Image (cartoon, rainbow, N blue to C red):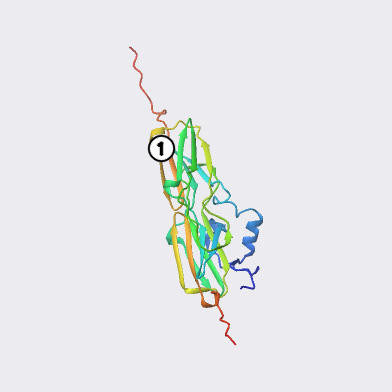
Amino acid sequence: MYNWNILDDMFSMKNLMERAFGELSSGSFSGGTPAINVYEMDTASEIKALVPGLTRDEIEITFEKGLLTIATRERKDDQKPDGTVIREECCRSQFRRSVRFAREIERDAISASLENGVLTVTLPHKAESTPRKIEVH
Amino acid sequence: MTNEITSRPQTGETSTLRRVSMPVNIRETEDAFILTAEIPGATRDSVTVELEHDELTIEARADLSPSGKAIITEFAPTLYTRTFHVGRLVDREKIEARVENGLLNLRLTKTRDAKPQRIEIKSA
């Protein structure tokens, strides 16, 4: 029906350069594992992961002995989309990724939020640095 | 593949953003093309969809600013951008865009020319 490749990319030179240097595969989680950033603040550590297409019910977060694991849950109700596939480069792959934290974490105070496909997990540090007065009896 | 240069004038603002060709899925149904693009971190307001001549350009901006001292950095503030050649297949008045959970979903309704046409064979 068409005499050219439908919905072909129009490549700018910049895009071609980026592709040559592997830019395409970074910055998202289509390769299978989500890209993460980890930050450390005074009172807490924070991990951000790019998880486009996932809802909060599809993500499982566990913390054990300093190891935080983010993983996808098994999806049951995945409906098959209609139509013929023209391009398939993404989305919503299964993954499991763990990060070890050196700082002591207040495990009961760990919290997580999901916004615009970015998962943020906040891990408050244990208040070990607070000065404590010890009485001599 | 068309190797035409499609870059537009760069503003100073975009120079701090990393440009990324985001991955997409495209499906074709009888009356539309359904495009899904990964744009994690981009807000609805930052998304632009432009159909000019034969080209469809989608752009989205994710600020993704750091929260503290960075220990691991695998992503940075990003300008997601990609341009597709759509020829005269897409009806410019009927493009629907939706942003949800870091995905951009586009429904591009086909023009009459792009839909399959059945030709009746007249009996002799």
The one of A117 and A40 positioned closer to us in this rendering = A117
Residue A130's place in the image compared with A41, above or below, is above
Count of picture labels: 1
Quarter of the picture containing the N terminus of chain A is: bottom right
The residue indicated by pointer 1 is A110
Q: Can you name the residue that lies furthest to the bottom here?
A: B124
Quarter of the picture containing the C terminus of chain A is: top left
The disc numbered 1 marks a residue on which chain? A
Residue type at the position of mark 1:
Ile
Residue B25's place in the image compared with B118, above or below, is above
Q: Can you name the residue that lies furthest to the top here?
A: A137
Where residue A6 sits in the image (x, y, percent)? 60, 68
Q: Residue at x 65, y 61 (%)?
A: A16
Where residue B113 sits in the image (x, y, percent)? 54, 77
The one of B2 and B15 positioned closer to us in this rendering = B2
Q: Is residue A1 left or right of residue B14?
A: right
Residue A137's place in the image compared with B37, above or below, is above
Residue A68's place in the image compared with B83, above or below, is above
Q: Can you name the residue that lies furthest to the front here?
A: B124
Q: Residues within 10 Å of mark 1 (few under 14, many from 20)?
A: some
The one of A96 and B61 positioned closer to us in this rendering = A96
Say what secondary structure mark 1 lies in.
loop
Residue A60 falls in image quadrant: top left
Where residue A45 sits in the image (x, y, percent)? 45, 38
Where residue A43 sits in the image (x, y, percent)? 41, 36
